[in-house]
Image (spheres, grey):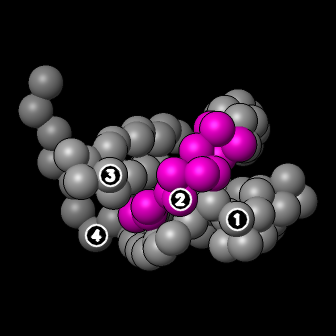
Amino acid sequence: MIITIFRSRVKPEAEKEYMQWAERMNALAVKMPGYIAHKKFTAADGERVTIVEFESEETHHAWSQHPEHVEAKKKGRSTFYSEYRILVCTVQRESKYS
């Protein structure tokens, strides 16, 4: 499994347009082969964290290179984000309790 941790801060003036793009990317991501799940969190200080899970490097790469996602990433860098950090991780071990 591949996990992406995306930490960001959205410029206040870009919030409305950002949310429209985010909704579209969410709808698209869940339809991608290999998609497992994603969760979003917003801290009290405004930092956003999204955790995305894909089943393999190949399926993660396909999402990364999807034309609409590439366009959204460009828009993010040019318009939406005051800062961001992306960590792409391979799961070494997993344990669960239900």
Q: In the displayed image of the protein, which residue is found farthest to the left?
A: 97
**Percent x, y for residue 48?**
38, 52
| Residue at image point 51% right, 51% down | 12
Direction from residue 87 to residue 63 in the image, left or right:
right
Q: Which residue is mark 3?
A: 46
Element carrying mark 2: loop
Marks 1 & 2, CB-CB < 8 Å contact = yes
| Residue at image point 70% right, 65% down | 79
> Within the image, what quadrant is residue 91 found in?
bottom left
Tell me: residue 49, above or below residue 79.
above
Name the amino acid, label 2. Answer: Lys
Direction from residue 75 to residue 29 in the image, left or right:
left
Q: Give the magenta part as a residue range.
A: 7-19
Real-space CA distance between mark 2 and mark 4, rounded to the nearest whole angstrom: 35 Å
Tell me: residue 29, above or below residue 49.
above
Nearer the viewer's eye, disc 3 or disc 4? 3
Looking at the picture, tell me which residue is in the foreground, 60 or 4.
4
**Percent x, y for residue 37?**
48, 38
Mark closer to the chain start, 4 or 1: 1
Name the amino acid, label 3. Answer: Gly
Q: Which mark is residue 92?
A: 4
Real-space CA distance between mark 4 and mark 1, rounded to the nearest whole angstrom: 35 Å
Magenta-drawn stretch, dominant element (helix, strand or loop) = helix
Real-space CA distance between mark 2 and mark 3, rounded to the nearest whole angstrom: 10 Å
Mark closer to the chain start, 3 or 1: 3
Q: Which residue is mark 1?
A: 79
> Within the image, what quadrant is residue 24 found in?
top right
Real-space CA distance between mark 3 and mark 4, rounded to the nearest whole angstrom: 30 Å
